[in-house]
Amino acid sequence: MPSTPQLSISISPHLTALAMISDALAGRRRGLPELWRKALASRVSRLGHQAVRPLAAPGYSVVPDSLVPRTPIGADVSVQAQITALRDLPPDNLIKDLEQAFGGGAPPPHWRSAAEHPVPWLHGYAGALSDIWQSAEPLWKRARPLLDREIQRVGVATVRGGPELLLGSLNHRIKYGERGLLISDVESSTYDLGDREIVLVPMLAGRDAVIVSLDNEEAVWIAYPVRGADSLWRQPLAPAHDELSALMGPVRADLLCAVGEPMTMSMLASDMKIAPSSITYHCDRLRAARLINRERRGREVWITRTHRADELLDLFRRHT
């Protein structure tokens, strides 16, 4: 990096949505509170869950550029603009992005389904982005004072000098020193910034969430958790869950939201901090209502949501 890098800031919420998708749906945990993880996961369709799984494959952090077809360089990007860009993206572009990200030949196993069926994958991922944002947008609006404060902080550092100190204070996974800017990642690489600008993108995300793009010829961007976000996680997610609780009771509502992915009875009892006998009772009631299925595999009983339950949750999402 040059001694005085050029900085700017972008308020582009679609990267907040991407960070939440990676944490709550794909399983790459980055500090999002557990209640938020479960609530967000419960509001995404089965196709959306399938589309986002490649994002958290162990040992990989590189993803195709199609995940962010509109980069936050030059102007802020809304979530709706990102969703539209994904749905309009030609499938050949996704395949080319996969080849560029992982070299020639077949992509890694976790991306092969997207390469073989690019249109369903793009629509599934765009749908997941839409579902996540429908729940997270009220929180983003409440975060406006934090974002304004961060705009001021970046502006002061840019005008008065000291951008190196600012870069070193973005997140504990980012450090600035004699070797340049060091960003913690599971795949090591070295990049030369040259004369490119650094675009900072504050996110409303878990404390360990950092997303970077270093390949653009004009600028690079770094998305990081905005300061003070911890105070917002304690506020309720959205009224839909409260309405569901009023319909079937808080325990059964929480249980139904928790099984967006298959879980065992013991896992549910541990996560929800409820006695196994109580979990069995509530599962019996949900099964009688045809909202869950139970399947014994060896010594464990696995719980999954039914299509009927997904339709019920979709109904509450639409009325949120």
Image (cartoon, grey):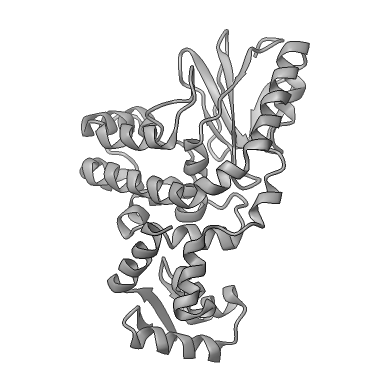
* Residue 108 x/y as whole percent: 35, 43
Quadrant hosting residue 88: top left
Quadrant hosting residue 277: bottom right
* Residue 138 x/y as whole percent: 53, 48
* Residue 131 x/y as whole percent: 40, 51
Residue 144 versus residue 270: which sits nearer the camera? 144
Q: Is residue 90 above or below residue 264?
A: above
Residue 286 versus residue 320: which sits nearer the camera? 320
Q: Is residue 154 above or below residue 53?
A: above
Q: Residue at x 45, y 80 (%)?
A: 248
Q: Is residue 163 above or below residue 124?
A: above
Q: Residue at x 38, y 46 (%)?
A: 130
Q: Residue at x 45, y 55 (%)?
A: 25
Q: Residue at x 64, y 57 (%)?
A: 235
Q: Is residue 239 visible?
A: yes
Relative side of 279 to 3, left or right: left
Relative side of 299 to 236, left or right: left
* Residue 221 x/y as whole percent: 54, 24
Relative side of 217 to 184, left or right: left
Q: Quadrant of the C terminus?
A: bottom left
Q: Is residue 225 visible?
A: no
